[in-house]
């Protein structure tokens, strides 16, 4: 718990009054220590990503020396893009998502599904405009494994409990070997979804190569904007 209300306001580009309003509405993850609010940096980054808020570079976790930061295009290539995912409710859709996800040998699909459902029970991963980011809270891939993002388009939109009330038609699911890679990919997805052209491709369920090419261009913009070395 290393962040204060002032820190969070600065990192998210809002006023302290706004942060206190979020606290009053219980919208933002926080802890009460000695009559003061404190925030966990990783939880704030995940929350800001889920809310599709602009993220200050200072909030991004540092990539270990000698390692390249994860990029959305490469992670999508690794995880795959799938169409016409079946399911009539959230649990059924997530089960089908796990079925098409590329999992390493020895990792139980039932276990991964339990983690996704547990995450949804804490708070919906729907970020509005028909998109959700279902993901486990802890890294599941072995150290050194390439991170992956699985993009799945649903055959029929499903209620995920989004704040805007819109049913979800597209899922971005992140699996990573480290917490840093996990959070960096969530930040890149949020950045991409704020881009009107990329969101149009998602809305229209464009072809794989078109989505991957757009993601590669956004990776370049994200790295330049946040001072990330590629």
Image (cartoon, rainbow, N blue to C red):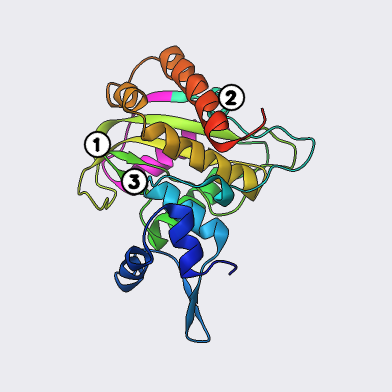
Give the number of the mark in front: 1 or 3: 3
Number of residues whose C-alpha sits closer than 10 Å to that of mark 1, classed few (under 14), some (14–19) or many (20 or more) = many
Compute the Cα span from label 1 to label 2: 27 Å
Q: Residue 26 location, x and y as percent? A: 34, 69
For image coordinates 40% across by 55% down, the residue present is: 120
Earlier-in-chain disc, 1 versus 3: 3
Cα distance in 3D space between marks 1 and 3? 14 Å
Q: Of helix, strand and loop, which one carries label 3?
A: strand
Viewer-nearest residue: 109 or 20? 20
Q: Position of residue 158 (x, y in %)?
A: 25, 42
Image: 208 above or below 57: above
Q: CA distance from mark 3 to mark 2?
A: 23 Å
Residue labelled with disc 1: 157
The quadrant of the picture occupied by the N terminus is bottom right
Query: Is residue 114 in view?
Result: no
- How many marks do you count on the picture? 3
Residue at the far right in the pictured view: 66
Is 184 colored magenta in this rendering? Answer: no
In the image, the segment drawn in magenta is 82-102
- Tell me which residue sits at (39%, 47%) in the image: 53
Label 1 secondary element: strand
Residue 83 colored magenta?
yes
Which mark, residue 74? 2
Q: Residues within 10 Å of mark 3 (few under 14, many from 20)?
A: many
């Amino acid at each position: 718990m290393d962040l204060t209300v002032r820190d969070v306001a600065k990192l998210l580009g809002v006023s302290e009054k706004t942060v206190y309003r979020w606290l009053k509405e219980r919208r933002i993850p926080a802890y009460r220590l000695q009559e003061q609010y404190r925030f966990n940096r990783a939880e704030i980054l995940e929350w800001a990503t889920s809310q599709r808020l602009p993220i200050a570079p200072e909030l991004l976790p540092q990539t270990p020396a000698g390692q390249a930061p994860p990029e959305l295009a490469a992670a999508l290539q690794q995880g795959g893009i799938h169409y016409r995912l079946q399911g009539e409710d959230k649990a059924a859709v997530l089960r089908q998502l796990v079925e098409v996800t590329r999992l390493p040998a020895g990792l139980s699909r039932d276990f991964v599904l339990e983690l996704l459902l547990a995450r949804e029970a804490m708070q919906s991963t729907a970020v509005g405009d028909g998109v959700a980011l279902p993901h486990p809270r802890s890294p599941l891939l072995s150290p050194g494994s390439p991170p992956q993002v699985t993009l799945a388009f649903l055959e029929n939109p499903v209620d995920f409990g989004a704040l805007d009330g819109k049913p979800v038609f597209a899922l971005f699911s992140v699996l990573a070997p480290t917490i840093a890679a996990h959070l960096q990919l969530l930040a890149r997805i949020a950045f991409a979804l704020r881009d009107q052209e990329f969101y149009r491709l998602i809305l229209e369920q464009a072809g794989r190569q078109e989505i991957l090419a757009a993601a590669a261009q956004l990776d370049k913009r994200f790295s330049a904007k946040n001072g990330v070395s590629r």
